[in-house]
Image (spheres, rainbow, N blue to C red):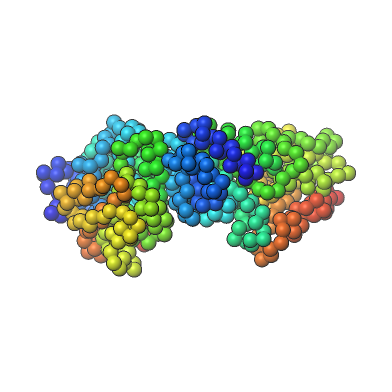
Amino acid sequence: MSVMTATDSAPTLGPLLRRLTGDEKHGPSAHSTLDVLWVLYDRVLRVTPDRVDDPERDRFLLSKGHGPAAYYAVLAAKGFIPADWLDDLAGPASRLGHHPDRLLVPGVEIGSGSLGHGLGLGVGTALGLRAQGLTDQRVYVLLGDAELDEGSNHEAIAYAGATGLRSLTAIVVDNHSASHGWPGGIASRFTVNGWSATTVDGRDHDALEAALTGHDSHRPHVVVAVVAPKDDYVSGARSADGAGDADQVGA
Amino acid sequence: MRQTFVDTTTALLDADPRTALVLADISASAFAPAAVRHPDRVLNVGIREQLMLGVAGGLALTGLRPFVHSYAPFVVDRAYEQIKLDLGHQGVGAVLVSVGASYDGSQMGRTHMSPGDVALFDTLGGWTVHVPGHPDEVPALLRAAATHDDPVYVRLTTAQNAHPHAGDGGLRVLRQGRSDAPLVIAVGPLLDATLGAVEGLDVTVAYTHTPRPFDVAGLRALAAGDVVLVEPYLAGTSSAVVAAALTDRPHRLLSLGVGHADLHRYGTPADHDRWHGLDAAGLRRSISGFLR
């Protein structure tokens, strides 16, 4: 369940990740977001490399911009960026840094890195699509459980719930990295504000797919994707992602 | 000015389906009729300024032209990182329209004052900053801002000059001194106090409602030596711009504006003008002392 299989059509992700990290030891399991990202791009999002500017595409916003190696590997596997971009992560001429920049990477909807910005941008994106009659499009925003510490998220959660912003799906990858935890669970922060919520094994592709498409027609939806605690592989994630600010690694 | 903003923006919402408005409760009742007609483009997020700017960034990413409005300390100071990242870093713009200015809300205290707003936009770069000095200057600025996607800040205030001075934002000479006379530049609502302050002095007075981008060409054409800046926000905000424009010629510069200190005082805006030396008498003292 926690290992990529050939049936996922993702046998190339491991080698792509290693091009980013130069790290033979740590497989895909070192990346908390990898399975969610793969399921999104392989099974859920209606976006392809030739549609990155199509107003009618689905949007995926990586709010948790830390450790984007898995994101870049998936974008390369799906043809959004050339695989050879992976070989010079954060180099002086590289388009790929330790936090993604939407002006540098085709298919990247927002530049992120400072935590707590993606959900507000996602709310605005959903509202902007709705105002233009694009009601079939969906906006997905990926956050981390520690990222929820930022109060800006709770402004967005409350407002999206209160106004029934039905085209919005938040995904919280929960690797138990929030310093003070979330007593009562992460999903409850959303459901008390009127969201629907599904909590799933963040490595189970079928369960993820069902959850990511499990929204209803009148309220926003959150998928809490639970993966192994950060501490179980933080050394791997840190070296693999090359993130310098250990404070927010895995957030 | 606030009512002019409401009327003009309401008309823009009616006329242009690209225009959107994001509020955080402030002025929501004034825009209630527009919200009824355009519920998908008039969005009040409640008292959530970080979200207000984030929503504006998202709207702009989908191709809309968001107007964003609150008191200056809330739409600028409080949401500074959202302005920097949710707009600037994403490569999108918005029209931020503030009320309150440096101390229109002096009786509400320091929490409602934003003398540093224009200086904050200078840390980001690329922003057009309008500081109108009369309500009649406002509609054209807003209508022009609706037609493109670049970042624009419009700083509205309850202070105003007796007469509007429209124009493209370039320095406009309203009082001509001798050919080598000192140049006094008044920004927005401080024009009338400035004109009163220099009565009888041989100076040229030029006005602008658009300090960013600063009219560098106009400055170079008018500056003969001594330059005085009179700005209704933090003193020295435009000093670097003026100094950079005049690096190749000898000049002296006096920068007048609101002081840095939190005075911990209430009172009226006129009281604060006096305390910061921005009433006609205070300006006269500073300018004649500098030119002596």
> What residue is rendered at 62% in x and 45% in y?
B2
Residue B6 percent coordinates (x, y): 58, 42
Residue B235 percent coordinates (x, y): 68, 53
In the rendered view, tell whether residue B228 sits above or below residue B73. Answer: above
Q: Nearer the viewer, residue A164 or B83?
A: A164
Does residue B23 appear in the picture of this structure? yes
Can you tell which quarter of the image residue B184 is in?
top right
Residue B83 percent coordinates (x, y): 49, 48
Q: Nearer the viewer, residue A29 or B234?
A: B234
Q: Nearer the viewer, residue A31 or B118?
A: B118
Q: Nearer the viewer, residue A88 or B102?
A: B102
Can you tell which quarter of the image residue A180 is in?
bottom left
Q: Quadrant of the N terminus of chain B?
A: top right
Judge from the rendering whether residue B106 lies leftward or rightward of residue B281; answer left or right: left
Judge from the rendering whether residue B95 lies leftward or rightward of residue B227; answer left or right: left
In the rendered view, tell whether residue B138 sits above or below residue B100. Answer: above
